Each structure stands twice: as C-alpha cells, then as structure tokens.
Amino acid sequence: MKPMPPHLEIHDDRFATLVHPVSTLDVIAEGFTWTEGPVWCGDHDCLLFSDIPSQRIMRWSDTEGLSVYREGSGFNNGNTRDTQGRLVGCRHGARDVVRTEADGSLRVLADRFQGKRLNSPNDVVVSSDGAVWFTDPTYGILSNFEGRRRPPEQSARNVFRLSPDGDLGAVVTDFVQPNGLCFSPDEKTLYISESGSSHDASVPSVIRRFAVDGGTLRDEGVFAEIDRGLPDGMRCDVMGNLWSSAADGVHCFDPEGGLLGKILVPRVVSNLCFGGRDGHRMFITATSHVYRVFVDVHGAEPWTRGRG
C-alpha cells in the first residue's frame, strides 16, 4: 500500500481505496465566521453553504468562483434538497425549517410543535417518501452568535419528522443536543449525532443508530464514538460508509461502525457533503474555511452527482 499524505490517517487498508493516496486537501473558500450546511447542486454544478453568524448562504463553483446566494439568511444552518430538488434549510433566527420554492420564495415547513416554538432547527434530511427529518437542539438560542438568545419553549431537544401530509412528530426525545443526521443508502437506518459534550463533558460524543420503520424509529444503540471533539454533520456514501465531522477532521466508519480512517483538517469541521462535476469530491466546512478533497466513492444522496 502506498504511504498516506499528511492529511490522511489510515486505520484500515480499505480507507486507501476511498481516499486516493495522492489526493490533496485544497482550500476553495475562506474568510468566513462559521461555515456549515454544505450541499452540492449537481444540476447547477455548484456548492451552497452557510456562514451562520454572517447570515448568508454562499455559492461556489469551479467556473464562477464564490458569490452570495442569499443575504439575510436568518442564521441559516443545515441545508439539504428534497425529492424535487428544492433547497430545504434550518434557520436559527426564525427557529424554523424552510423550503426555497422555484420562484425563490421561502415556505415555512415547521416552526412550532404542540403550540410552542421550536428551539433552533439545526440539520435536516429528506427521505425518498418526501418526509423531512430534522434535529432541534438549543444552539441557536443559547447566545446571539449564531441566533438570538431566548429561553427554550420545548421541554426537550427532539428529533422531528414532518410527514408528506404536514404532520409534525417527535421521533426521538432523549438526546442532550441532537445535531447532524443522515440515512444509510437504503434508508433502513438513520444516524444521529449527539453533540451535548459541547457544554457538558460528561455527555459521550457518539453517533447513535436507529432502525427506520415507516415514520418511526427504533433505537439500536451507539454506532460509533468520536475520539476528538464531537460529531456534527455527516453523510453516507453509496457503500454505506459513514463520514462524520470531528475536531480533527472527517472520520470515516464502515457500516458496522469500525473506524477506517480520517481526513485530517487543520480547523474544526462542522459538516461535509459529496459532490463535484464527477461526484468524486468531498466538500468540508471547517470554522472559517471550506475545503475540497478527492474521494473515490459517490455520496448516497442522488443530487450529489455532477453533470458527468
């Protein structure tokens, strides 16, 4: 096996088939306050990502470079796309989940549960049936840095499912601070990160695994533990490997939870996504920067594919 470059840490030989030994970790954008929510739009050949404290969603492409996609984003954090390709985002400021319609207008999908305002929706995924799943920790109401300081109205930090019919239900209620989430390629498993150690060192920095049964979840325990910092955003590839953010970079786990290796990043990683024109790039949001690295596997979400 060829030696790994400095930005790669190998724990299993299989990792060398996922991130090529001659790959490089490149900075494609910098100078932000706190980057998050990367989402690749293969039909437009561009990356969107949030700069939460600056209340902007940024756009980047190989051909056009960096531009502002949306000003006054309301402390938008996590982003995804729905089954029709529409952008779905979580806003800390308004404490809601919104969808960008074809004409550019915003439609609020969820902002209250049982008559009370949500905490601050953080990250979001959409399943193939059109249901919207999102986490609702309190990060956006703890300070004025990435939201507005407010007392919570919800009694818990829940994980929610918004059905295609518009019914909102709490599917997991026992997290300290639920954060990133993603489905396995077959959508039979939902992974959710526990980031409560951000404010309580006694909370384990783990990724939990849940079996999906229609609109309900069955707890299957801890999938993996992050040994540096805490898990935040994450994605699955088409082989079922889970790639999670961490303090020292991106950690890659096989479908059984074994650590395959790490992409080491010099800044704390918040999130990541697959994309690029050929679908073989990973985009990593890390504090004030956005990085790109070649990966020899596609992401599980269909909209991460490029134009070919």
Image: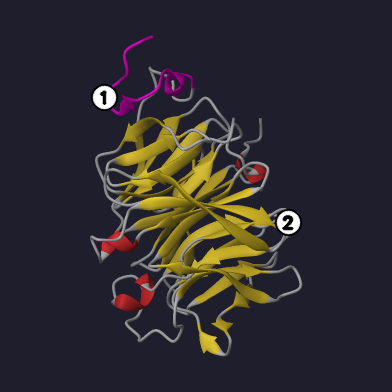
The type of residue carrying mark 2 is: Gln
Q: Quadrant of residue 12?
A: top left
**Callout in the foreground (2, 1):** 1
Asked if residue 126 shows in the view, the reply is yes
Asked if residue 107 shows in the view, the reply is no
- Residue highlighted by disc 2: 84
In this rendering, the answer to whether 194 lies above or below 271 is below
User: Dot 1, crowdedness within 10 Å: few (<14), some or many (≥20)?
Assistant: few
Residue at the image point whose x is 32% and y is 55% from the top: 204
The type of residue carrying mark 1 is: Pro
Residue at the image point whose x is 36% and y is 45% from the top: 225
Percent position of residue 89, x then y? 54, 65
In the image, is residue 280 part of the stretch drawn in magenta?
no
Q: Earlier in the sequence, mark 2 or mark 1?
A: 1
The span picked out in magenta is 1-17
In this rendering, the answer to whether 155 lies above or below 171 is below
* Local secondary structure at mark 1: loop
In the image, is residue 8 part of the stretch drawn in magenta?
yes
**Residue 256 shows which numbered tag?**
none
Q: Quadrant of the N terminus?
A: top left
Q: Quadrant of residue 58?
A: bottom left
Percent position of residue 272, x then y? 45, 45
- Residue highlighted by disc 1: 6
Q: Which of these two is toward me, 58 or 272?
A: 272
Residue at the image point whose x is 51% and y is 35% from the top: 256
Residue at the image point whose x is 30% and y is 60% from the top: 203
* Local secondary structure at mark 2: loop
Q: Quadrant of the C terminus?
A: top right
Q: Does residue 227 appear to the left or right of 216 in the view shown? A: left
